[in-house]
Image: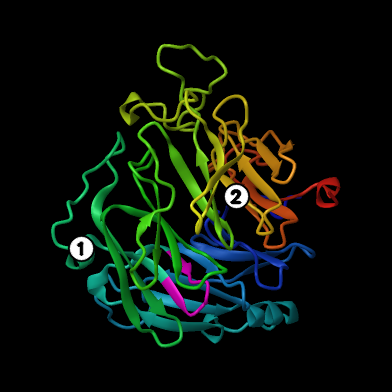
């Protein structure tokens, strides 16, 4: 079911973050209907309402315990020094109620400025709302990170052909009620995709971002800065990517099998030249990782026991690329380079092709994300767009026969 359609183009929130409002009725997304702003669409009525004004930076964080939305933006009032960022709260319940009544007020009536970050932090990036919903966590700049980096730690250089991954970087936070800021941790590499465990306050998951294969992709740390460690310790031959917290103690991730084994021809494997920019990671400069000489597939790691299972693997092409799972641990979902969407029953190990035909010319990838109740999956797709690029928000239900099993 497509919730949006049109030439403007939409973009869903990344799978590391919540997509639905706490009442389960609205999906939040970014839209070019009003460039640079976020919108909400009601699954039942199809109503679309603008929910930000003044733009935003980084990731939209939709609360699970209240009808609130949190995001970062450059201060729109006052003479703030460069580098300062304000954290904004939006009361979605009031926005939707007034919109339905046709009595919308100025944006300031629905917004609350939680606080403004110190300019020297150079805050930004993938802001994430803590599981306790009292703090938000975000990246800081290299100079601030260097201040907190333990003495003697060697700073990482760029890794791979995209010249990304160099450090240092760090994570800090803001209390959304008091505006207090605090520092969490510094690491010697580039930080990407900060996310939280919605069920465990104070647990942060993030990655070493290189634009491709990382020496050690996934990391976990407590909000007090303790417990920093690799989430899934990987080897040089493993290409780990697109991690997402899916249940109280689990993180799903892709162990990519998208590259041909050196010296062997494999015509079933899609090449980066099929559609320009559509299928990344084929460059030899990435090293030996990402082939199927070793086990690959949709991996799930238990945060506490550190045990890993492979939920499944597509037996052709790139294998799984972007992955997610239902909070009740029943299902996992993933896409591939062909933009096909596969569902896995984790209890029976059955695998089902849910959708196909999502164009590789699209402006972005499918990025599947399960709903909190585990009954449906949100994706973005250019399937019905006239230009083959503009994306729309789409809901794919878990088949009724699988829900009844």
Label 2 sits on a secondary structure element that is strand
Q: Answer with mark 2 or mark 1, whichever residue precedes in sequence.
A: 1
Look at the image and say whether residue 224 sits in the magenta stretch: no
Counting from the top left corner in percent of width and height, residue 87 is at 42, 76
Q: Is residue 346 above or below residue 235?
A: below
Q: Residue at x 68, y 83 (%)?
A: 103
Q: Is residue 391 above or below residue 144?
A: above
Q: Is residue 55 visible to us here? A: no
On screen, residue 154 versus residue 393, left or right, reads left
Q: Residue at x 57, y 36 (%)?
A: 320
Label 1 sits on a secondary structure element that is loop
Q: Residue at x 26, y 70 (%)?
A: 121
Q: Which span of residues is magenta-colored? A: 127-136
Q: Is residue 27 above or below residue 98?
A: above
Q: Residues within 10 Å of mark 1 (few under 14, many from 20)?
A: some
Counting from the top left corner in percent of width and height, residue 172 is at 33, 70
Counting from the top left corner in percent of width and height, residue 104 is at 64, 81
Find disc 1 in the rendering and name its residue: 149
Q: Which residue occupies the foreground of this view, 202 or 108?
A: 202
Find disc 2 in the rendering and name its residue: 324
Q: Are marks 2 and 1 in contact (CB under 8 Å)?
A: no
Q: Which residue occupies the foreground of this view, 210 or 263?
A: 263
């Amino acid at each position: 079911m497509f919730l949006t359609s049109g030439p403007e183009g939409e973009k869903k929130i990344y799978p590391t973050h919540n997509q639905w409002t706490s009442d389960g009725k609205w999906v939040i997304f970014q839209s070019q209907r009003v460039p640079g702003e976020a919108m909400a669409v009601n699954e039942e009525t199809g109503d679309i309402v603008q929910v930000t004004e003044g733009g935003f930076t980084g990731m939209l964080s939709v609360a699970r315990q209240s009808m609130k939305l949190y995001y970062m933006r450059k201060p729109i009032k006052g003479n703030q020094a460069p580098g300062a960022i304000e954290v904004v709260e939006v009361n979605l319940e009031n926005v939707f109620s007034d919109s339905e009544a046709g009595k919308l007020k100025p944006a300031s009536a629905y917004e609350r400025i939680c606080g403004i970050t110190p300019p020297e932090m150079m805050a930004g990036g993938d802001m994430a709302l803590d599981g306790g919903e009292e703090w938000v966590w975000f990246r800081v700049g290299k100079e601030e990170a260097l201040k907190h980096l333990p003495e003697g730690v060697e700073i990482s250089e760029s890794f791979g052909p995209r010249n990304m991954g160099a450090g240092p970087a760090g994570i800090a936070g803001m209390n959304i009620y008091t505006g207090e800021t605090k520092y969490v941790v510094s690491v010697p590499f580039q930080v990407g995709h900060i996310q939280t465990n919605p069920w465990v306050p104070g647990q942060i998951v993030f990655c070493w971002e290189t634009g491709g294969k990382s020496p050690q992709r996934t990391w976990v740390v407590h909000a007090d800065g303790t417990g920093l460690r690799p989430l899934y310790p990987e080897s040089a031959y493993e290409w780990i990517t697109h991690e997402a917290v899916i249940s109280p103690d689990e993180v799903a991730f892709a162990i990519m099998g998208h590259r041909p084994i050196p010296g062997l021809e494999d015509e079933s494997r899609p090449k980066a030249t099929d559609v320009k920019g559509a299928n990344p990671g084929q460059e030899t400069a990435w090293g030996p990782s990402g082939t199927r000489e070793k086990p690959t597939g949709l991996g799930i790691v238990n945060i506490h026991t550190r045990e890993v299972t492979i939920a499944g693997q597509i037996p052709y092409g790139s294998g799984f690329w972007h992955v997610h799972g239902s909070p009740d641990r029943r299902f996992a979902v993933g896409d591939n380079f062909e933009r096909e969407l596969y569902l896995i029953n984790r209890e029976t190990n059955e695998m089902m092709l849910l959708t196909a035909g999502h164009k590789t010319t699209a402006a972005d990838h499918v990025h599947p994300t399960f709903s909190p109740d585990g009954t449906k999956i949100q994706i973005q797709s250019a399937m019905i767009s006239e230009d083959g690029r503009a994306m729309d928000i789409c809901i794919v239900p878990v088949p009724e026969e699988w829900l009844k099993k």
